Image (cartoon, grey):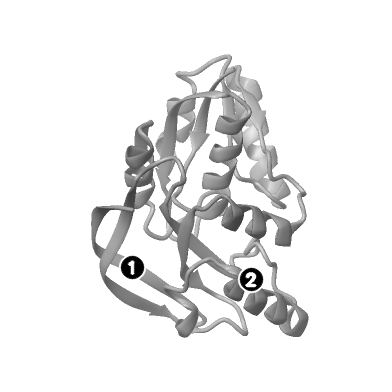
Amino acid sequence: MKAISLLSGGKDSFLSLLIALSIGMDVERTITVKAEQDSYMFHFPNTELGSRLSEIMGISNSSIIESEFKETISLYPGYFLVAGAVESEFQKTKLEEMCTELGLKTFFPLWRKNQEQIVRDFISTGSRGIFVTVAAEGLDEKFLGRPIDEESLRILNETKLKHGISIIGEGGEYETLVTCSPFSTRCIEIEDTEVIDRGIQKILKIKKYRFEDS
């Protein structure tokens, strides 16, 4: 099964890619969309590192702007498009309509899966990642840079009970960056960051990084 996979650098697209690989899909290329800041379709912060993540996994990558997306996937008729959609009907429907028009099939392995289990599945793969955006009551600047681990999941569960957030961040409550894959001995080591304050939304911008053996 030949496939291409969306890879923003966030946990959901990354976990979807891992699932596709684990069931034997031949993922020929990843696609990293450098989205508009308030895109309804694609992950925004630090997307340039999606291509670096693909690089350490040994998969070719196309890094494109949002307006080039349809033209890019049109080059792969008959392929599966792998994406990390979880709850967004808008995102899922748009991708399905586009793929149907262009002759691709879709694979959404996380669709409507238990949200807490998705985070646990990411942790259990041995992957590593951090939180790079917060935009919800109960999640403040101190959450930026935290690892995606059991302690973070505990905090997310408490915040859900108190403020009703999505555990998976589906409503934009937070976004993540994967820094280490179980399929690679190389990781992304972050050296310098800057916090961008947009009111309730705080973004951890990665200013400098290096590759390091795990």
Where residue 210 sits in the image (x, y, percent)? 23, 56
**Earlier residue among tags 1 and 2:** 2
The nearer-to-camera label among 1 and 2 is: 2
Q: Picture quarter containing residue 151?
A: bottom right
Residue occupying image coordinates x 38% and y 38%: 57
Instruction: Determine the secondary structure under disc 2.
Output: helix
Is the Cβ of the residue at disc 1 closer than 8 Å to that at disc 2? no
Residue neighbourhood size for the residue with mark 2, other residues' Cα within 10 Å, grouped as few (<14), some (14–19), many (≥20): some
Quadrant location of the N terminus in the rendered image: top right
Q: Is residue 35 above or below residue 4?
A: below
Residue nearer the viewer, 177 or 104: 177
- Separation (CA) of disc 1 from disc 2: 22 Å
Residue matched to label 2: 153
At x 32% / y 38%, what residue is drawn? 55
* Direction top: furthest residue: 78
Tell me: 3 left or right of 59: right
**At label 1, which amino acid type do we have?**
Lys
Residue 206 image position (x, y, % from top left): 30, 65
